[in-house]
Image (cartoon, grey):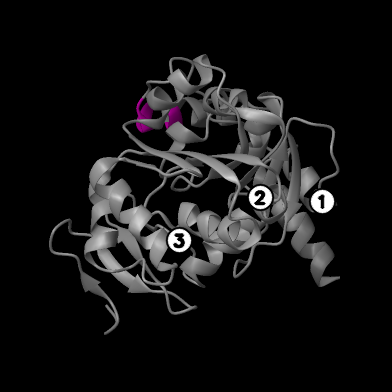
Amino acid sequence: MADDDYKNSSSGLTIELTGDGSATFYSEEFGEHFHCRHGAYTDAQRNYVDAANIPELAKAERLSILDVCYGLGYNTAAALDTIQQVNPDCQVTIRALEINVTVVRDAIANNLIHHWTPHTQQILKTLATEQSYKSPTLDIQLILGDARQTLQPLAAKGWQADAILFDPFSPPRCPQLWTVEFFKLTAQCLAESGILATYSCAAAVRSAMGLAGLTMGSLPGTGRHWPCTVATKAQRPLPDLSPQEQEHLQTRAAIPYRDPTLAATAEAIMAQRQQEQQESKLEPTSAWRRRWLTRQRG
């Protein structure tokens, strides 16, 4: 472990510095970092807030945001600071979903939120202890529990988000939140003209989005070797998927994760998908990869 890394004694999470000087957690449970190691703050701002068009959306009188997998609170914090800069009078509603409140509180305890403005830092601290924050312009709730269950009441009430910041751990590590069924539930909470932004460009993820009725676009991922994905329900222009990305959706990698009951274990979801892949007549992903490597070298 590098000198800049150390254990968080209260939760066992490892705190690591990222490329832009900000810190993130490494989860031993999931075997992944919470943010891009090229820059955690940069990741929140560019791959979520900017990708979801929040600087433009904040010019309106009202703005609703759904933060799926709140984690350390960086995506919400970046959104709040951006909105404050663009339009301090905007009436903002945020619903943030998170399963592990320990992560939320440890980010505060270890002062990992120091980059954000003092006002936003105070909001994050209040959310960590009270799970809600209200002011004349803000209505924020941190909703704890399995997102598959906590999102259902919002969908049932017809609650709509102008922007969805979709940031679970990767599909192989947390397939429960990348299924066709969860994307359908999430899409119910997306306004007709709204945008969903996520770091993942996995074919299985994009296939699930399509089956959920979403239209996808591709954006260069800041600090990443692969693109990010934006999606919408509206017939609005989005950056096109490249020919390589489009062909990826015709391979076995595009067989989506499924969870009809929204209650299956990760192991069950993975096993079902693996069986579908083994029985599939779609092109093997390895053949697609070799073909594009040959084209790039040529």
Callout 3 secondary element: loop
Residue 19 in view:
yes
Whichever of callouts 1 and 3 sits on the residue coming sooner in the sequence is 3
At x 28% / y 43%, what residue is drawn?
Answer: 100
Residue 124, quarter of picture: bottom left
**Going 78% across and 58% down the picture, which residue do you hit?**
292
Q: Residue at left 46%, top 57%?
A: 77
Q: Earlier in the sequence, mark 3 or mark 2?
A: 3
Give the residue type that dot 2 points to. Answer: Ala
Image: 178 above or below 8: above
* x then y, percent, for residue 25: 33, 62
Q: Position of residue 239 (x, y in %)?
A: 82, 51
In the rendered structure, are the residues bearing label 1 and label 2 in contact, judged by CB atoms less than 8 Å apart?
no
Residue 54 placement, left or right of 44: right
Q: Which residues are magenta?
A: 265-270
| Residue 269 magenta-highlighted | yes
Q: Which residue is mark 2?
A: 58
- Which residue is tagged 3? 35
- Work out which quarter of the rendered image holds the C terminus and state it: bottom right
Magenta residue check for 41: no
- Compare residues 127 and 259 and report the one nearer the observer: 127
Magenta part, dominant SS: helix
Tell whether 48 sits left or right of 215: left
Q: Amino acid at mark 3?
A: His
Query: Residue 53, labelled with which disc?
Result: none
Which residue is label 1 attached to? 239
In the orientation shown, which residue stands out farthest toward the bottom?
3
How many C-alpha atoms fall within 10 Å of the one at disc 1: few (<14), some, or many (≥20)? few
